[in-house]
Image (cartoon, rainbow, N blue to C red):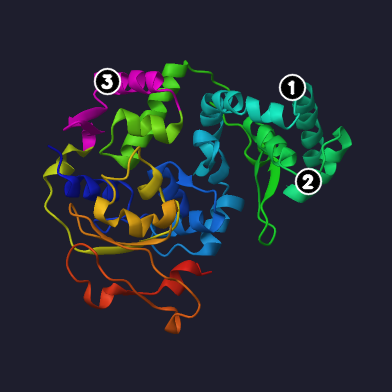
């Protein structure tokens, strides 16, 4: 029978959230976890910060815009994620066809037929080549030329379609707004980017990255996270097992090279604050092995996902409920009661204000 506390500790350590594990740069964080949930850009930045050492907002922005080592786009399940830039094209080739197929009904509802989507892709390519980077409202103005009304969801779906077909990606921020740029201009193709591998090979590689970033995990965790069919996920798991890349950990799996961690003794207490939609909270099929069931209502009140405090030793896991980070909190400080595990003492008083205002 699985030791849930140990699984939580191992997952936290894999996610660079425990055991005093902190990466040195934004790019290193994203390489380690492979994908940061990024529907909310601020939460994504905080998700990078909490896994790093002395990572400021300026350093994260430089990773996106100067180094271009990380990129934001619609990847797993068709939702926004930040992933390592060198992986953008092969992940898009693997996932985009199924995302586009799954969106076909919505395209039909919005009156976006195949011809209109193709013309929209061409128009967006021309507009970005001539005037980019462009914001969503600016691209929406250009789309009027092919008869797309500016109100409603049609402009969003056409911009997303252009991203999924490899026309554009997220570029530099302009104030608080995201902008879009041509993918091939922003991230010039590398020597291996044109290589087309068999689907099973790329699925197995995606599964390998997932296991390293989230283990202990099961095949259904991977299928849920990636949005791929369970049949493909099972074949990938079989490949990883046959090649010795993963080993069994009860009913779950871990990277073979990490087996020694299963025998390690607990480390020192490690306190982190997790943003909404953090990988640790949403990167698995279920919640039970990440957060004790007794505390689900505090982490997901009303079904939502709120920022949370985590106090993690290794291999044990101690969870603290969501902070009330309102401006009216005296001094911006939040005193979070530990709902499981030992008292944090002075470390139980955490600065929610400082966390939510990423240092520059």
In terms of secondary structure, where does tag 3 sit? Answer: loop
Say whether disc 1 or disc 2 marks the residue closer to the N-terminus. 1
Residue at figure coordinates x 37%, y 54% from the top left: 23
> Residue 177: x and y, percent?
68, 56
Residue at figure coordinates x 36%, y 57% from the top left: 299
* Disc nearest the viewer among 3 and 1: 1
Q: Is 317 situated left or right of 100 in this image?
A: left
Residue 243, numbered circle: 3
Q: Is 14 situated left or right of 206 in this image?
A: left
In terms of secondary structure, where does tag 2 sit? Answer: loop
Query: Can you say whether 266 is above or below 154 in the image?
Result: below
Q: Dot 1 surroundings within 10 Å: few (below 14), some, or many (20 or more)?
A: few
Residue at figure coordinates x 33%, y 30% from the top left: 220
Residue 151, numbered circle: 2
Instruction: Identify the magenta region.
Output: 228-257
Q: Residue furthest top?
A: 198
| Marks 1/2: CA–CA distance | 20 Å
* Disc nearest the viewer among 3 and 2: 2
Residue 292 visible, this angle: no
Q: Which residue is mark 1?
A: 114
């Amino acid at each position: 029978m699985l030791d849930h506390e140990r699984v939580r500790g191992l997952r936290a350590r894999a996610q660079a959230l425990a055991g005093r594990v902190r990466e040195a740069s934004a790019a290193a964080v994203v390489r380690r976890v492979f994908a940061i949930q990024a529907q909310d850009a601020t939460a994504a930045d905080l998700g990078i910060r909490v896994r790093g050492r002395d990572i400021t907002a300026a350093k994260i922005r430089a990773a996106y815009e100067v180094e271009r080592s990380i990129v934001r786009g619609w990847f797993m399940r068709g939702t926004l994620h930040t992933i390592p830039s060198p992986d953008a094209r092969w992940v898009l080739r693997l996932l985009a066809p199924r995302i586009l197929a799954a969106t076909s009904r919505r395209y039909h509802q919005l009156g976006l037929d195949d011809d209109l989507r193709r013309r929209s892709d061409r128009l967006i390519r021309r507009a970005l080549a001539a005037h980019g980077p462009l914001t969503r409202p600016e691209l929406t103005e250009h789309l009027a030329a092919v008869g797309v009304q500016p109100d409603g969801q049609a402009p969003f779906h056409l911009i997303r379609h252009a991203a999924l077909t490899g026309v554009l990606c997220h570029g530099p921020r302009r104030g608080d707004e995201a902008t879009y740029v041509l993918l091939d201009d922003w991230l010039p193709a590398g020597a291996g980017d044109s290589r087309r591998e068999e689907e099973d090979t790329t699925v197995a590689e995606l599964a390998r990255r997932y296991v390293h970033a989230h283990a202990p995990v099961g095949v259904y965790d991977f299928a849920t996270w990636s949005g791929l069919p369970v049949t493909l996920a099972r074949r990938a798991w079989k490949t990883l097992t046959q090649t010795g890349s993963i080993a069994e950990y009860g009913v779950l799996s871990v990277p073979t090279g990490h087996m020694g961690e299963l025998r390690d003794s607990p480390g020192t207490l490690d306190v982190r604050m997790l943003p909404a939609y953090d990988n640790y909270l949403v990167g698995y099929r279920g919640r039970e092995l990440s957060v004790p069931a007794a505390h689900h209502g505090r982490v997901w009140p009303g079904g939502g996902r709120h920022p949370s405090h985590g106090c993690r030793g290794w291999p044990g896991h101690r969870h603290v409920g969501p902070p009330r980070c309102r401006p009216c909190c005296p001094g911006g400080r939040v005193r979070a009661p530990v709902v499981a595990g030992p008292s944090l003492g002075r470390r139980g008083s955490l600065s929610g204000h400082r966390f939510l205002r990423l240092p520059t």
